Structures are given as structure tokens and as C-alpha cells.
């Protein structure tokens, strides 16, 4: 199945902005993170098709996964 992974902020450095990827049926958000070599510590905020999601959520064909790093500042 095809899924689009979109990276934001510092996650883009040395990587990509948006990347289509092929994953097996039954793949999870965590599988998509693994395929993009993004660790759990790097992926602080996850949105699937515009809604907050968790790593164990199952993906479906055509999904769009947005990944944000931890937010800091003050």
C-alpha cells in the first residue's frame, strides 16, 4: 500500500520534506517510522490524515503521515 510521509522542522535536515513509500498491508505508523529511519525519540508528534495518532495505529492505502520533532523553546 502507498503512504506519504511528511517531515517537519528539524526532521527535514538531511532527509526529505515529503516521501511516498510502499508498505505491506497491515503496516502500522511505527512501520512507516522504521522505513524512514526515524526513532521514537525524534517523532514526538504524529498526525495521520490530519488527526493525532499513535505508533500502533494501522495504516491504509493512501494515508498521509505527518511527523514533527519535539517542540522546545521558551
Image (tube, rainbow, N blue to C red):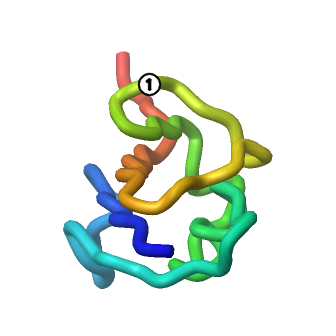
Residue 22, image x, y percentages: 48, 83
Q: Which residue position is annotated with label 1?
A: 51
Residue 71, compared with residue 8, is above or below; it is above
Q: In the rendered image, which quarter contains the C terminus?
A: top left
Coordinates of residue 67 in the picture (x, y in percent): 43, 49
In the displayed structure image, the side of residue 52 where residue 2 appears, left or right:
left
Q: Is residue 17 above or below residue 49?
A: below
Indicate whether 66 appears above or below 18: above
SS at badge 1: strand
Residue that protrudes farthest toward the top in the picture: 74
The residue that appears at 46% across and 39% down in the rendered structure is: 48
Residue drawn at point x = 59 percent, y = 32 percent = 53
User: Relative to the observer, which residue lies in front, 27 or 65?
Assistant: 27
What is the crowding at mark 1: few (fewer than 14 residues within 10 Å), some, or many (at least 20)?
Answer: few
Count of numbered circles in the view: 1
Of all residues shown, which one is farthest toward the left?
17
Query: Relative to residue 24, is residue 43 drawn left or right?
Result: left
**Pick the front one: 25 or 74:** 25
Image check: 31 left or right of 36?
A: right
Q: Nearer the viewer, residue 13 or 61?
A: 61
Q: Residue 1 at x, y = what percent?
A: 50, 74
What residue do we see at 51% from left, 78% from top? 36
Amino acid at each position: 500500500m502507498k503512504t506519504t510521509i511528511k517531515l517537519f522542522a528539524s526532521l527535514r535536515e538531511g532527509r526529505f520534506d515529503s516521501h511516498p513509500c510502499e508498505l505491506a498491508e497491515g503496516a502500522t505508523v511505527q512501520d512507516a517510522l522504521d522505513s524512514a529511519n526515524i526513532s521514537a525519540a525524534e517523532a514526538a508528534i504524529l498526525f495521520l490524515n490530519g488527526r493525532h495518532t499513535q505508533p500502533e495505529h494501522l495504516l491504509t492505502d493512501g494515508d498521509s503521515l505527518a511527523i514533527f520533532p519535539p517542540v522546545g523553546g521558551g
